[in-house]
Image (cartoon, grey):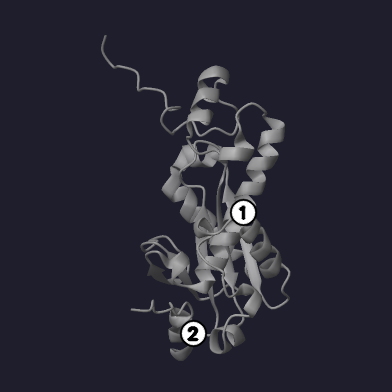
Amino acid sequence: MPRVATDRFHFERELLAAGTLRFAGVDEAGRGPLAGPVVAAAVILPPAWVNGGMPGELADLNDSKQLTEAQRERFFALLTGHPEVEFAVAECDPATIDAINILQATHRAMNTALRRLEPRPPHALVDGTRVKSLIVAQTPLVKGDSRSYSIAAASVLAKVTRDRAMVAADERWPGYGFAKHKGYPTPEHLEALARLGPCPIHRRSFAPLRQPEPELFG
């Protein structure tokens, strides 16, 4: 049987039909790495695209993990350079992640990105499960970055922004291979950690960096 194409504006059209005329796709990048920030993006695509279809040059926009680096960079340039696309990006640094935990830091970055959109949209399409602390109404979509163009756009913006930050970190702290693995716990990264120890952008609350709790009694 032929594969049925996914309608990746289905949820956006439902919102428009319900009278919600302004909404953002929201996604994050960088929850799993041992180093670097967690980055969130919020993107509002033009209603004309929702009703009339994605422009041809963006039709293959998808979950950033399903795209090559070159594709992500191309879509990033198209989205951020389009006068009708609204977007905002925010991050939480490793110190904040260690202080409040990665989940709360991710949600804080999402809310910051939403606050940076003017005026703030009243609704968001969010990748994954419901975010209890989100400052606007939401439609949570598991695997939303492959089901919604709005979330896919946010996925690409968050991923490219974070990857660029890790390439810059590689120049500042050479030897860890940040430009290659982007802070994820690859064998190369773990070997560098064992040899060099952590640098200022490592997340000290993440294993294997987390220090064991001191024993209360000897």
Q: What's the residue at 49%, 84% (across, down)?
A: 20
Q: Which mark is residue 69?
A: 1
Rendered image quadrant of residue 5 = bottom left
For badge 1, the amino acid type reads Glu
Circle 2 Cα neighbour tier, 10 Å, few/some/many (<14 / 14–19 / ≥20)? some
Spot occupied by residue 172 in the image (x, y as percentages of width and height): 71, 32
> Left or right: where does residue 157 sit relative to residue 107?
right
Residue topped by disc 2 = 20
Circle 1 Cα neighbour tier, 10 Å, few/some/many (<14 / 14–19 / ≥20)? some
Q: From the viewer's perspective, is residue 115 above or below residue 189?
A: below
Q: From the viewer's perspective, is residue 157 above or below residue 103?
A: below
Q: From the viewer's perspective, is residue 181 above or below residue 12?
A: above
Question: In which quadrant will I find the N terminus?
Answer: bottom left
Spot occupied by residue 162 in the image (x, y as percentages of width and height): 61, 49
Q: Nearer the viewer, residue 163 or 140?
A: 163
Q: Nearer the viewer, residue 191 or 109?
A: 191
> Left or right: where does residue 88 sit relative to residue 27?
right
Q: Which mark is residue 102?
A: none
Between the residue at mark 2 and the residue at mark 1, the CA separation in whole angstroms equals: 34 Å
Q: From the viewer's perspective, is residue 7 above or below residue 154?
A: below
- Report helix, strand or loop for mark 1: helix
Camera sees residue 114: no
Which circle, 2 or 1, is nearer the viewer?
1
Rendered image quadrant of residue 81 = bottom right
For badge 2, the amino acid type reads Thr
Q: What's the residue at 66%, 58% (across, down)?
A: 73
Q: Earlier in the sequence, mark 2 or mark 1?
A: 2
Spot occupied by residue 52 in the image (x, y as percentages of width and height): 57, 89
Camera sees residue 123: yes
- Report helix, strand or loop for mark 2: loop
